[in-house]
Image (spheres, grey):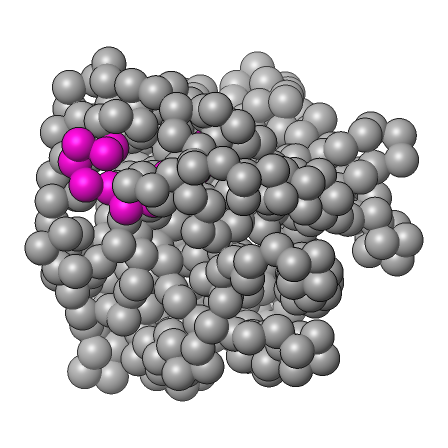
Amino acid sequence: NQLHYLAHFDSLTGAANRRLFEDRCKQSIETAKRYDSCLALLSIDIDHFKKINDTLGHDGGDDFLIELVSRFQRSVRKEDTIARLGGDEFAILLPNVSGQDGAEVVARNILESITKPVTIKGNELIITSSIGITLCPEDASSYEALLKNADMAMYRAKNNGRNNIQFYCEDMNSEMIRQIEIEKDLRVALKEQQFSLHYQPIVDTKSGEIIALEALTRWNHPEKGVIMPDEFINIADQTGLLQQIGEWSINQLCAECKILSEQHVQELPIAFNLTRRQYNHPRLLQMLSDACETHRFNPKQLILELSENTLVQVGDDALKILRKLKSFGCLIAIDGFGTGSSSLNQLNALPIDIIKIDRSLVTSCLTNKQHRIILETLLTIAKQLGIKTFASGVETPAQEAFLQKNKCHYVQGFLYSQALSIGPLIDFLAKTDTQEGLHSGDQ
Protein backbone atom coordinates (compact mmCIF):
# COMPACT_ATOMS: atom_id res chain seq x y z
CA ASN A 1 0.00 0.00 0.00
CA GLN A 2 2.84 2.37 0.84
CA LEU A 3 4.64 1.64 -2.43
CA HIS A 4 1.39 2.24 -4.33
CA TYR A 5 0.89 5.56 -2.52
CA LEU A 6 4.45 6.75 -3.22
CA ALA A 7 4.06 5.81 -6.88
CA HIS A 8 0.91 7.90 -7.33
CA PHE A 9 0.90 10.74 -4.79
CA ASP A 10 3.16 13.63 -3.80
CA SER A 11 4.76 12.65 -0.48
CA LEU A 12 4.77 16.24 0.85
CA THR A 13 1.26 17.50 0.10
CA GLY A 14 -0.75 14.35 -0.57
CA ALA A 15 -1.81 15.68 -3.98
CA ALA A 16 -1.73 13.40 -7.02
CA ASN A 17 1.61 13.24 -8.78
CA ARG A 18 2.18 13.67 -12.51
CA ARG A 19 1.72 9.94 -13.26
CA LEU A 20 -1.64 9.62 -11.50
CA PHE A 21 -2.85 12.96 -12.89
CA GLU A 22 -2.11 11.90 -16.46
CA ASP A 23 -3.95 8.61 -15.94
CA ARG A 24 -7.05 10.30 -14.50
CA CYS A 25 -7.05 12.94 -17.24
CA LYS A 26 -6.96 10.29 -19.96
CA GLN A 27 -9.83 8.39 -18.34
CA SER A 28 -11.88 11.60 -18.01
CA ILE A 29 -11.21 12.50 -21.65
CA GLU A 30 -12.59 9.14 -22.79
CA THR A 31 -15.63 9.58 -20.52
CA ALA A 32 -16.23 13.09 -21.88
CA LYS A 33 -16.12 11.74 -25.46
CA ARG A 34 -18.50 8.88 -24.63
CA TYR A 35 -21.11 10.98 -22.83
CA ASP A 36 -20.60 14.22 -24.77
CA SER A 37 -19.67 16.10 -21.61
CA CYS A 38 -17.04 18.75 -20.88
CA LEU A 39 -13.96 18.74 -18.67
CA ALA A 40 -11.55 21.52 -17.71
CA LEU A 41 -7.85 21.41 -16.91
CA LEU A 42 -6.36 24.18 -14.77
CA SER A 43 -2.65 25.03 -14.63
CA ILE A 44 -1.74 26.98 -11.47
CA ASP A 45 1.55 28.72 -10.71
CA ILE A 46 2.26 30.53 -7.44
CA ASP A 47 3.54 34.05 -8.06
CA HIS A 48 7.03 34.71 -6.66
CA PHE A 49 7.13 31.43 -4.71
CA LYS A 50 10.94 31.59 -4.69
CA LYS A 51 10.76 34.54 -2.29
CA ILE A 52 9.11 32.32 0.34
CA ASN A 53 11.93 29.79 0.14
CA ASP A 54 14.55 32.55 0.16
CA THR A 55 13.11 34.37 3.18
CA LEU A 56 11.58 31.56 5.29
CA GLY A 57 13.70 28.63 4.16
CA HIS A 58 12.59 25.44 2.43
CA ASP A 59 10.78 24.27 5.57
CA GLY A 60 8.64 27.40 5.39
CA GLY A 61 8.06 26.78 1.69
CA ASP A 62 6.98 23.20 2.41
CA ASP A 63 4.55 24.37 5.11
CA PHE A 64 3.04 26.81 2.64
CA LEU A 65 2.60 24.13 -0.05
CA ILE A 66 0.80 21.83 2.43
CA GLU A 67 -1.55 24.69 3.36
CA LEU A 68 -2.03 25.53 -0.31
CA VAL A 69 -3.22 22.02 -1.21
CA SER A 70 -5.57 22.11 1.77
CA ARG A 71 -7.10 25.30 0.35
CA PHE A 72 -7.41 23.71 -3.09
CA GLN A 73 -9.30 20.78 -1.56
CA ARG A 74 -11.79 23.14 0.10
CA SER A 75 -12.36 24.95 -3.22
CA VAL A 76 -13.14 21.95 -5.47
CA ARG A 77 -15.47 18.94 -5.52
CA LYS A 78 -14.56 15.46 -4.28
CA GLU A 79 -14.46 14.10 -7.83
CA ASP A 80 -11.91 16.71 -8.94
CA THR A 81 -8.19 15.84 -8.97
CA ILE A 82 -5.50 18.11 -7.53
CA ALA A 83 -1.95 17.37 -8.69
CA ARG A 84 1.46 18.75 -7.84
CA LEU A 85 3.49 18.51 -11.03
CA GLY A 86 6.67 19.91 -9.50
CA GLY A 87 7.89 22.73 -7.25
CA ASP A 88 5.11 25.30 -7.03
CA GLU A 89 3.43 24.03 -10.23
CA PHE A 90 -0.04 22.58 -9.72
CA ALA A 91 -2.79 21.31 -12.01
CA ILE A 92 -6.44 20.53 -11.31
CA LEU A 93 -8.76 18.30 -13.33
CA LEU A 94 -12.45 19.23 -13.32
CA PRO A 95 -14.43 16.39 -14.97
CA ASN A 96 -18.02 16.89 -16.06
CA VAL A 97 -17.93 20.66 -15.67
CA SER A 98 -20.53 23.02 -17.14
CA GLY A 99 -18.30 24.61 -19.76
CA GLN A 100 -16.37 27.86 -19.42
CA ASP A 101 -18.72 29.35 -16.82
CA GLY A 102 -18.41 26.37 -14.49
CA ALA A 103 -14.63 26.26 -14.80
CA GLU A 104 -14.36 30.00 -14.14
CA VAL A 105 -16.42 29.74 -10.94
CA VAL A 106 -14.04 27.10 -9.58
CA ALA A 107 -10.95 29.06 -10.68
CA ARG A 108 -12.18 32.23 -9.00
CA ASN A 109 -12.84 30.29 -5.78
CA ILE A 110 -9.27 28.99 -5.94
CA LEU A 111 -7.83 32.43 -6.69
CA GLU A 112 -9.74 33.92 -3.77
CA SER A 113 -8.73 31.16 -1.35
CA ILE A 114 -5.04 31.50 -2.25
CA THR A 115 -4.96 35.25 -1.62
CA LYS A 116 -6.27 34.94 1.95
CA PRO A 117 -3.43 35.65 4.43
CA VAL A 118 -1.47 32.60 5.61
CA THR A 119 0.82 32.49 8.65
CA ILE A 120 4.07 30.58 8.18
CA LYS A 121 6.67 30.53 10.96
CA GLY A 122 5.01 33.52 12.60
CA ASN A 123 5.03 35.53 9.35
CA GLU A 124 1.76 36.55 7.71
CA LEU A 125 1.98 36.17 3.93
CA ILE A 126 -0.36 37.25 1.16
CA ILE A 127 0.26 35.13 -1.92
CA THR A 128 -1.19 35.44 -5.42
CA SER A 129 -1.32 32.98 -8.30
CA SER A 130 -1.69 32.80 -12.07
CA ILE A 131 -4.25 30.34 -13.47
CA GLY A 132 -4.64 29.06 -17.02
CA ILE A 133 -7.70 27.07 -18.12
CA THR A 134 -8.39 24.87 -21.13
CA LEU A 135 -11.53 22.88 -22.02
CA CYS A 136 -12.07 19.49 -23.58
CA PRO A 137 -13.27 18.83 -26.26
CA GLU A 138 -13.54 22.52 -27.20
CA ASP A 139 -9.78 23.23 -27.19
CA ALA A 140 -8.25 19.76 -27.55
CA SER A 141 -8.99 16.10 -26.89
CA SER A 142 -5.64 14.68 -25.75
CA TYR A 143 -3.91 14.97 -22.39
CA GLU A 144 -0.67 16.32 -23.86
CA ALA A 145 -2.45 19.05 -25.86
CA LEU A 146 -4.65 20.07 -22.93
CA LEU A 147 -1.70 20.37 -20.56
CA LYS A 148 0.20 22.45 -23.10
CA ASN A 149 -2.85 24.69 -23.65
CA ALA A 150 -3.36 25.21 -19.92
CA ASP A 151 0.32 26.10 -19.49
CA MET A 152 0.15 28.64 -22.31
CA ALA A 153 -2.92 30.23 -20.76
CA MET A 154 -1.18 30.31 -17.37
CA TYR A 155 1.86 32.11 -18.85
CA ARG A 156 -0.51 34.61 -20.47
CA ALA A 157 -1.96 35.23 -17.00
CA LYS A 158 1.55 35.82 -15.61
CA ASN A 159 2.38 38.21 -18.44
CA ASN A 160 -0.89 40.08 -17.84
CA GLY A 161 0.19 41.11 -14.36
CA ARG A 162 -0.26 37.85 -12.42
CA ASN A 163 -3.08 37.16 -9.91
CA ASN A 164 -5.59 36.56 -12.71
CA ILE A 165 -7.27 33.86 -14.80
CA GLN A 166 -6.84 33.31 -18.54
CA PHE A 167 -8.67 30.85 -20.80
CA TYR A 168 -6.79 29.23 -23.65
CA CYS A 169 -7.52 30.59 -27.13
CA GLU A 170 -6.13 29.62 -30.53
CA ASP A 171 -4.00 32.74 -30.99
CA MET A 172 -1.83 31.58 -28.06
CA ASN A 173 -0.38 28.87 -30.29
CA SER A 174 0.67 31.35 -32.96
CA GLU A 175 1.97 33.69 -30.26
CA MET A 176 4.02 30.88 -28.74
CA ILE A 177 5.47 30.01 -32.15
CA ARG A 178 6.29 33.69 -32.71
CA GLN A 179 8.08 33.89 -29.36
CA ILE A 180 10.11 30.76 -30.10
CA GLU A 181 11.15 32.21 -33.48
CA ILE A 182 12.12 35.55 -31.90
CA GLU A 183 14.14 33.77 -29.21
CA LYS A 184 15.99 31.75 -31.88
CA ASP A 185 16.66 34.88 -33.97
CA LEU A 186 17.83 36.80 -30.88
CA ARG A 187 20.51 34.21 -30.19
CA VAL A 188 21.76 34.64 -33.77
CA ALA A 189 21.53 38.44 -33.42
CA LEU A 190 23.76 38.38 -30.34
CA LYS A 191 26.30 36.20 -32.09
CA GLU A 192 26.32 38.34 -35.25
CA GLN A 193 25.99 41.72 -33.41
CA GLN A 194 22.81 42.82 -35.19
CA PHE A 195 22.00 45.46 -32.57
CA SER A 196 22.62 49.20 -32.65
CA LEU A 197 21.89 52.19 -30.45
CA HIS A 198 19.77 55.20 -31.35
CA TYR A 199 19.61 58.35 -29.26
CA GLN A 200 16.65 60.66 -28.71
CA PRO A 201 17.37 64.17 -27.41
CA ILE A 202 15.99 65.39 -24.07
CA VAL A 203 15.27 69.12 -24.09
CA ASP A 204 15.16 71.76 -21.36
CA THR A 205 11.72 73.43 -21.44
CA LYS A 206 13.10 76.86 -20.46
CA SER A 207 16.09 77.20 -22.76
CA GLY A 208 15.19 74.77 -25.51
CA GLU A 209 18.70 73.32 -25.24
CA ILE A 210 19.46 69.61 -25.50
CA ILE A 211 20.62 68.65 -22.00
CA ALA A 212 20.68 64.81 -22.29
CA LEU A 213 20.05 61.85 -24.59
CA GLU A 214 18.13 58.63 -24.14
CA ALA A 215 19.80 55.50 -25.55
CA LEU A 216 17.40 53.11 -27.28
CA THR A 217 18.36 49.65 -28.56
CA ARG A 218 17.40 48.69 -32.11
CA TRP A 219 17.58 45.22 -33.65
CA ASN A 220 18.67 45.30 -37.30
CA HIS A 221 17.18 42.03 -38.52
CA PRO A 222 18.65 40.95 -41.87
CA GLU A 223 15.22 39.97 -43.26
CA LYS A 224 12.64 41.91 -41.21
CA GLY A 225 14.52 45.22 -41.10
CA VAL A 226 14.69 47.36 -37.96
CA ILE A 227 12.78 45.80 -35.04
CA MET A 228 11.75 48.09 -32.18
CA PRO A 229 12.32 47.07 -28.52
CA ASP A 230 8.60 46.62 -27.82
CA GLU A 231 8.64 43.56 -30.09
CA PHE A 232 11.55 41.70 -28.47
CA ILE A 233 12.44 43.13 -25.03
CA ASN A 234 9.91 41.05 -23.04
CA ILE A 235 10.90 37.81 -24.76
CA ALA A 236 14.60 38.59 -24.30
CA ASP A 237 13.92 39.35 -20.62
CA GLN A 238 11.99 36.10 -20.04
CA THR A 239 14.65 33.95 -21.71
CA GLY A 240 17.61 35.57 -19.95
CA LEU A 241 19.02 36.99 -23.21
CA LEU A 242 18.34 40.59 -22.18
CA GLN A 243 21.27 40.51 -19.77
CA GLN A 244 23.65 39.94 -22.70
CA ILE A 245 21.88 42.56 -24.84
CA GLY A 246 22.01 45.03 -21.94
CA GLU A 247 25.73 44.41 -21.38
CA TRP A 248 26.40 44.99 -25.07
CA SER A 249 24.26 48.16 -25.02
CA ILE A 250 26.03 49.65 -22.00
CA ASN A 251 29.47 49.03 -23.53
CA GLN A 252 28.33 50.42 -26.89
CA LEU A 253 26.85 53.46 -25.16
CA CYS A 254 30.14 54.19 -23.38
CA ALA A 255 32.14 53.71 -26.60
CA GLU A 256 29.87 55.95 -28.70
CA CYS A 257 29.85 58.68 -26.05
CA LYS A 258 33.63 58.76 -26.44
CA ILE A 259 33.10 59.31 -30.19
CA LEU A 260 30.72 62.19 -29.37
CA SER A 261 33.31 63.87 -27.17
CA GLU A 262 36.02 63.39 -29.83
CA GLN A 263 33.76 65.21 -32.31
CA HIS A 264 33.82 68.23 -29.96
CA VAL A 265 30.16 67.69 -29.08
CA GLN A 266 29.31 68.72 -25.52
CA GLU A 267 29.28 65.91 -22.95
CA LEU A 268 25.65 64.97 -22.40
CA PRO A 269 24.17 62.64 -19.78
CA ILE A 270 22.75 59.45 -21.28
CA ALA A 271 19.54 57.79 -20.02
CA PHE A 272 19.34 54.00 -20.20
CA ASN A 273 16.37 51.81 -19.23
CA LEU A 274 16.74 48.76 -16.96
CA THR A 275 14.11 46.03 -16.59
CA ARG A 276 13.32 44.51 -13.19
CA ARG A 277 15.45 41.44 -13.90
CA GLN A 278 18.41 43.58 -14.98
CA TYR A 279 18.07 45.72 -11.86
CA ASN A 280 18.03 42.65 -9.60
CA HIS A 281 20.90 40.92 -11.39
CA PRO A 282 23.83 40.36 -8.99
CA ARG A 283 26.37 41.59 -11.58
CA LEU A 284 24.63 44.87 -12.43
CA LEU A 285 27.03 47.17 -10.58
CA GLN A 286 30.09 45.20 -11.73
CA MET A 287 28.88 45.33 -15.35
CA LEU A 288 28.42 49.11 -15.20
CA SER A 289 31.77 49.57 -13.48
CA ASP A 290 33.62 47.43 -16.04
CA ALA A 291 32.04 49.25 -18.99
CA CYS A 292 32.80 52.71 -17.58
CA GLU A 293 36.39 51.74 -16.76
CA THR A 294 37.03 50.08 -20.14
CA HIS A 295 35.75 53.08 -22.14
CA ARG A 296 36.76 55.79 -19.63
CA PHE A 297 33.15 56.86 -19.30
CA ASN A 298 32.15 59.03 -16.34
CA PRO A 299 29.32 57.24 -14.47
CA LYS A 300 27.96 60.65 -13.47
CA GLN A 301 26.83 60.96 -17.10
CA LEU A 302 24.61 57.88 -16.76
CA ILE A 303 20.89 58.15 -15.92
CA LEU A 304 19.37 54.77 -15.09
CA GLU A 305 15.63 54.55 -15.76
CA LEU A 306 13.73 52.03 -13.63
CA SER A 307 10.06 51.24 -14.07
CA GLU A 308 7.62 52.42 -11.44
CA ASN A 309 6.61 48.83 -10.63
CA THR A 310 10.25 47.82 -10.11
CA LEU A 311 10.69 50.48 -7.46
CA VAL A 312 7.34 49.72 -5.80
CA GLN A 313 8.62 46.25 -4.90
CA VAL A 314 12.03 47.42 -3.71
CA GLY A 315 12.99 45.51 -0.54
CA ASP A 316 15.95 46.11 1.75
CA ASP A 317 18.42 44.32 -0.54
CA ALA A 318 17.20 46.10 -3.66
CA LEU A 319 17.28 49.44 -1.81
CA LYS A 320 20.95 48.79 -1.02
CA ILE A 321 21.56 48.32 -4.76
CA LEU A 322 19.81 51.64 -5.44
CA ARG A 323 22.07 53.40 -2.94
CA LYS A 324 25.16 51.72 -4.39
CA LEU A 325 24.18 52.94 -7.87
CA LYS A 326 23.83 56.44 -6.46
CA SER A 327 27.22 56.17 -4.75
CA PHE A 328 28.70 54.95 -8.03
CA GLY A 329 27.59 58.28 -9.52
CA CYS A 330 24.48 57.37 -11.55
CA LEU A 331 21.33 59.45 -11.52
CA ILE A 332 18.09 57.49 -10.94
CA ALA A 333 14.84 58.13 -12.80
CA ILE A 334 11.42 56.49 -12.42
CA ASP A 335 10.22 55.58 -15.90
CA GLY A 336 6.54 55.67 -16.91
CA PHE A 337 5.46 57.42 -13.71
CA GLY A 338 1.75 58.03 -13.18
CA THR A 339 0.25 54.73 -14.33
CA GLY A 340 1.70 52.23 -11.85
CA SER A 341 1.11 51.70 -8.16
CA SER A 342 3.83 53.66 -6.37
CA SER A 343 2.73 55.91 -3.55
CA LEU A 344 3.74 59.53 -3.12
CA ASN A 345 5.36 58.54 0.18
CA GLN A 346 7.78 56.28 -1.75
CA LEU A 347 8.82 59.23 -3.90
CA ASN A 348 10.11 60.94 -0.78
CA ALA A 349 11.67 57.79 0.73
CA LEU A 350 13.66 56.59 -2.30
CA PRO A 351 16.84 58.32 -3.57
CA ILE A 352 15.23 59.44 -6.83
CA ASP A 353 16.52 62.31 -9.00
CA ILE A 354 13.94 62.41 -11.81
CA ILE A 355 10.42 61.18 -12.51
CA LYS A 356 9.61 60.49 -16.14
CA ILE A 357 5.91 61.06 -16.77
CA ASP A 358 4.26 58.27 -18.73
CA ARG A 359 3.65 59.20 -22.37
CA SER A 360 -0.01 58.14 -22.16
CA LEU A 361 -0.65 61.06 -19.79
CA VAL A 362 1.28 63.49 -21.99
CA THR A 363 -0.38 62.58 -25.29
CA SER A 364 -3.88 62.89 -23.79
CA CYS A 365 -3.35 65.79 -21.36
CA LEU A 366 -5.22 68.26 -23.60
CA THR A 367 -8.15 65.97 -24.46
CA ASN A 368 -8.67 63.95 -21.26
CA LYS A 369 -9.63 66.03 -18.23
CA GLN A 370 -8.75 63.30 -15.74
CA HIS A 371 -5.28 62.80 -17.25
CA ARG A 372 -4.74 66.57 -17.27
CA ILE A 373 -5.55 66.81 -13.55
CA ILE A 374 -3.29 63.83 -12.73
CA LEU A 375 -0.43 65.34 -14.73
CA GLU A 376 -0.81 68.79 -13.13
CA THR A 377 -0.89 67.19 -9.66
CA LEU A 378 2.20 65.04 -10.28
CA LEU A 379 4.19 68.01 -11.53
CA THR A 380 3.16 70.12 -8.54
CA ILE A 381 4.06 67.43 -5.99
CA ALA A 382 7.39 66.68 -7.66
CA LYS A 383 8.25 70.37 -7.50
CA GLN A 384 7.39 70.46 -3.78
CA LEU A 385 9.65 67.42 -3.18
CA GLY A 386 12.50 68.92 -5.19
CA ILE A 387 12.45 66.17 -7.82
CA LYS A 388 13.10 66.97 -11.49
CA THR A 389 10.33 66.10 -13.96
CA PHE A 390 10.66 64.75 -17.48
CA ALA A 391 7.80 64.26 -19.96
CA SER A 392 8.12 61.87 -22.92
CA GLY A 393 5.93 61.62 -26.00
CA VAL A 394 5.63 65.37 -26.70
CA GLU A 395 4.35 65.77 -30.26
CA THR A 396 2.65 69.18 -30.50
CA PRO A 397 3.48 72.78 -29.52
CA ALA A 398 0.27 72.84 -27.44
CA GLN A 399 1.51 69.93 -25.32
CA GLU A 400 4.86 71.68 -24.94
CA ALA A 401 3.14 74.91 -23.84
CA PHE A 402 1.06 72.99 -21.26
CA LEU A 403 4.18 71.37 -19.80
CA GLN A 404 6.05 74.68 -19.73
CA LYS A 405 3.13 76.33 -17.92
CA ASN A 406 3.13 73.56 -15.30
CA LYS A 407 6.91 73.81 -14.72
CA CYS A 408 7.97 70.48 -16.22
CA HIS A 409 11.76 70.59 -16.43
CA TYR A 410 12.54 68.36 -19.41
CA VAL A 411 10.70 67.08 -22.50
CA GLN A 412 11.29 64.52 -25.23
CA GLY A 413 9.39 63.52 -28.34
CA PHE A 414 8.95 63.73 -32.10
CA LEU A 415 8.27 67.46 -31.76
CA TYR A 416 12.02 67.87 -31.30
CA SER A 417 13.60 64.85 -32.94
CA GLN A 418 13.21 61.16 -33.63
CA ALA A 419 15.81 58.73 -32.26
CA LEU A 420 19.04 59.00 -34.28
CA SER A 421 22.01 56.70 -34.81
CA ILE A 422 25.44 58.01 -33.88
CA GLY A 423 26.31 59.52 -37.30
CA PRO A 424 23.11 61.57 -37.84
CA LEU A 425 23.16 62.44 -34.12
CA ILE A 426 26.58 64.11 -34.41
CA ASP A 427 25.33 66.20 -37.37
CA PHE A 428 22.11 67.04 -35.52
CA LEU A 429 23.93 68.18 -32.37
CA ALA A 430 26.40 70.24 -34.41
CA LYS A 431 23.49 71.98 -36.13
CA THR A 432 21.59 72.73 -32.92
CA ASP A 433 24.75 74.22 -31.39
CA THR A 434 24.34 77.09 -33.85
CA GLN A 435 20.66 77.63 -32.93
CA GLU A 436 19.08 79.12 -29.83
CA GLY A 437 17.04 76.05 -29.00
CA LEU A 438 14.52 73.45 -30.09
CA HIS A 439 11.27 75.02 -28.94
CA SER A 440 8.16 74.10 -30.94
CA GLY A 441 9.81 71.57 -33.18
CA ASP A 442 12.02 73.89 -35.23
CA GLN A 443 14.83 71.34 -35.60
Given residues 84 and 415, the one toward you in this image is 415
Q: Give the range drawn in magenta.
A: 403-413
Q: Does the magenta stretch include residue 422?
A: no
Whether residue 426 is visible: yes
Percent across and percent down for residue 11 are 51, 74
On screen, residue 124 versus residue 180, left or right, reads: left
What residue is shown at x 60% (from left), y 38% (from top)? 431
Total tally of numbered discs in the picture: 0
Percent across and percent down for residue 300 are 47, 72
On screen, 12 above or below 212?
A: below
Given residues 246 and 289, the one toward you in this image is 289
Rendered image quadrant of residue 256: bottom right
On screen, 251 above or below 216?
A: below
On screen, residue 274 versus residue 252, left or right, reads: left
Percent across and percent down for residue 343 are 17, 54
Q: Quadrant where the N terminus lies?
A: bottom right
Given residues 344 and 356, the one toward you in this image is 356
Rendered image quadrant of residue 367: top left
Q: Does the magenta stretch include residue 409?
A: yes
